[in-house]
Image (cartoon, grey):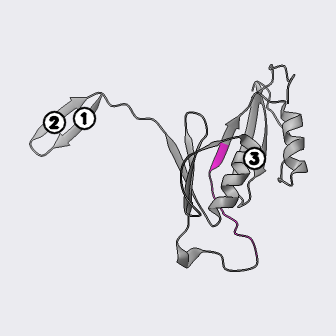
Amino acid sequence: MCCATIPGKNYFYKMTTRLTRVILFCNDVEKLKQFYQQHFTFTIAEEIKNEWVVLNAGPIEIAFHRIGEAYRNQNVKPFRIESNIKLVLSTDANITLFRTKLMQAGVPMQEIKSFAGYNYLFCDGEDTEGNVFQIVTPKIRLHSHE
């Protein structure tokens, strides 16, 4: 139970909160949109061409918002982000085959890992602007399809 305070009154009510969208600031909205559509089959929920896109990514949406003009990378070097956020993408795909397909498409991917007592296999990768993502699948799942 939560409490909302208004000067002179206290109201008690139940509050439900849930994470519905993650917004990542970026330099190239179109490139990130194509990356997540191509590799993870996310569909467009809303879009303002080259400025903003929201992708359906299951129960949470992922949005890409173009950074302000003063911060846009005008250099020859590609824009790279430094972030402490990791997007975790659960899949029913064979993680070994999925990782191989991503690497064949030029996506930087790390080794597949797990921990003792942890019933999942996972590996990290980077999207076109350096955002770290992780693909994860249960160890016990039969990886029969690609």
Q: Residue at x 87, y 22 (%)?
A: 144
Q: CA distance from mark 2 to mark 1?
A: 7 Å
* Location of mark 3 (residue): 38
The amino acid sitting under disc 1 is: Cys
| Contact flag, marks 2 and 1 (Cβ < 8 Å) | yes
The amino acid sitting under disc 3 is: Gln
* Location of mark 1 (residue): 3
Please state the extent of the stretch shown in magenta in the rendering.
77-87
Identify the mark nearer the N-term, 1 or 3. 1
Residue 66 appears at what percent x and percent y?
A: 56, 64
Magenta residue check for 86: yes
Q: Nearer the viewer, residue 95 or 116?
A: 95
* Location of mark 2 (residue): 10
Residue 111 seen by the camera:
no
Q: CA distance from mark 1 to mark 3?
A: 45 Å
- Outermost residue toward the left? 8
Q: What is the chief secondary structure element of the magenta stretch?
A: loop
Magenta residue check for 85: yes
Looking at the rendered structure, the secondary structure element under dot 3 is helix
Q: Is residue 37 above or below residue 67?
A: above
| Contact flag, marks 1 and 3 (Cβ < 8 Å) | no
Q: Which mark is residue 89?
A: none
Q: Residue at x 15, y 36 (%)?
A: 10
Identify the mark nearer the N-term, 2 or 3. 2
Looking at the rendered structure, the secondary structure element under dot 2 is strand
The amino acid sitting under disc 2 is: Asn
Residue 128 seen by the camera:
yes
Between disc 1 and disc 3, the foreground one is 3
Q: Characterize the local packing of mark 3: few (<14), some (14-19) or many (20 or more) Cα atoms within 10 angstroms.
A: few
Q: Residue at x 60, y 74 (%)?
A: 72
- Split into 4 quadrants, where in the image is the C terminus? top right
Q: Characterize the local packing of mark 2: few (<14), some (14-19) or many (20 or more) Cα atoms within 10 angstroms.
A: few
